[in-house]
Image: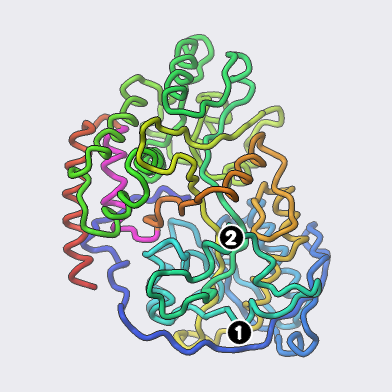
Amino acid sequence: MNDARRGSHLTDPGFLRNHGLTRRDALKFGAAGGGAALLGGISMTGYSAPHLAAQEEITGGPIEVGVLQEDPHPWFKHAQAIGDSLEADFPGTEVKYTFANTASDSARALRWQNGDPLDVDTGRWSNQAPPTWDWPNNGFILDLTPYTEETTESGEIWADTFTESARSFAIDTRADSATPGAWWGIPYEMTLMLMHYNVTAFEELGLTPPTTWAEFLDVCAAIDAVSGDTGMKPVCVSGPTDVYCGHWWDRMTQRIVGREGVEAVVYGDARVADDPGFLLAAQEIAKLPENGWFMEGFEGADFTTAQALFFQGKAAMIHMGTWLSSEMKDVIPEDYRMGVFDFPQYEGGAGNQSAMFGTAAIWSVANPEKSTSHEVNVPLAVEYVRRWTDPATQERGASELSFIPAVKGVAPPTSPAGLDVAVEQSAENETIIYYYGIHWDTALWAAWYQPVQALFLGATTPEGMIEMIDANMDEYRQVRDAGA
């Protein structure tokens, strides 16, 4: 997640999207095919073979796909190996990789809006994220339902191979949707937002992962009491990265106020000042900076630096997505022992205390009818997506990059410690999309998270933070309503 600062909500390009157009009729193409190769040092064997007739419809050509990390990151190499296999199996194929993480969100959105989409991109759809719904509503992305109904080599329908958690983010179950049951994208990886902690430090201090907020505060106090000797503070956070400060606000408001109360503010017209639970949540997370429990230098540490300092022992805990292991793979010391546990419960809170935060990472394919810059090779694009979900590919992602699989029958990663328990918990409980989907609307992002950042940096009080959020949201809604 890049920490690029967000601009004014009044000039944000997200508001330039059109609204209210009828979606195009679903295109029905044959299912995509695949082969096997050994490329880039990563075995690409094990793909399920499609129907022969469908494979004959795939022709090689240029294709542009999004990547969340850049070369030489291991995540990029994983994606590149999939692209290499496509180039080997379909002569004439040339895969272009375009950075598709937070820093490029606005630029990519403008490309899509102006007829120059990536053929395969992420961030265009999530059933739980209202900021993404304009893309299917306005026909920018392809309805992939016909492809998900194809049979794999194992005899299963492709749609039936996904876990229930992954399906809950991918299938259109929106209230009053014109396309109920549609697949506007394909899930390829699950992510959970969890507390990551230094197992060795906990053991040396005789600590166990806390399950309640009161216990968490006690753990922080115990770690801080010896920080003068160890150099390790309780909590790692990136001061310059507003959304990473906002993790704590999202989790605490869900515990104290509840999901419905939060969404009534961010996607409705409710005010945080009208529910005392929001002020209580602000007061609780303010205890972290007030007690000096953030790591030294957090005020100037960007997110990459902050995460590196966590692994260097400057903080005992960090709240982060399960991408942390793969994102920082190259800098984690070999002897580092990391564990995870879910965000603590808040006694007496109105929210579901077992709810977790996470998402399914989803690939969407551009609708050829909206592309004016080039002809979208739909069968080739769908085949690229399908190869991400092949069980062998999912197994490699789990074992080498700690990916949480999106398909059934693939074991979750064995590390960090406790991840298997967290995955099981997420399958049994409500999983709320992280950031409530706010991160796909950069104007809403700024309105909601920058006041939290100000609180953590000591620039405001909990009461001041509440006032800032309501003022920001009033401004945001004026523009939202004008463009609705």
State how far apart marks 1 and 2 are (Cα): 26 Å
**Lower sequence index among marks 1 and 2:** 2
- What element does badge 2 sit on? helix
For the point 58% across and 22% down, which residue is it? 208
Give the residue type that dot 1 points to. Answer: Asn
Q: Name the residue under label 2.
A: 166
Above or below, 248 relative to 14: above
Q: Position of residue 95 (x, y in %)?
A: 64, 73
Q: Is the magenta stretch mostly helix, strand or loop?
A: helix
Residue 372 appears in the figure: no
Q: Where is residue 384 in the image (x, y as percent from the top left)?
A: 66, 72
For the point 21% across and 53% down, which residue is it? 270
* Magenta stretch encompasses residue 259: no
Residue 243 appears in the figure: yes
Q: How crowded is the residue under tag 1: few (<14 C-alpha within 10 Å), some, or many (20+)?
A: some
Image quarter of residue 221: top left
- What element does badge 1 sit on? loop
In this rendered view, identify the residue nearer to me: 26 or 58. 26
Q: Nearer the viewer, mark 1 or mark 2?
A: 2
Above or below, 91 relative to 103: below
Image quarter of residue 151: bottom right
In this rendered view, identify the residue nearer to me: 354 or 448. 354
Q: Position of residue 478 (x, y in %)?
A: 16, 63
For the point 39% across and 60% down, which residue is it? 440
Image quarter of residue 186: bottom right
Q: The C terminus lies in which quarter of the figure?
A: bottom left
Give the residue type that dot 2 points to. Answer: Ala
Q: Residue 385 carries which label?
A: none
Q: Where is residue 19 in the image (x, y as percent from the top left)?
A: 30, 78
**Left or right of 240 in this view: 9:** left
Q: What stretch is highlighted in magenta?
A: 440-456
Q: Name the residue under label 1.
A: 377
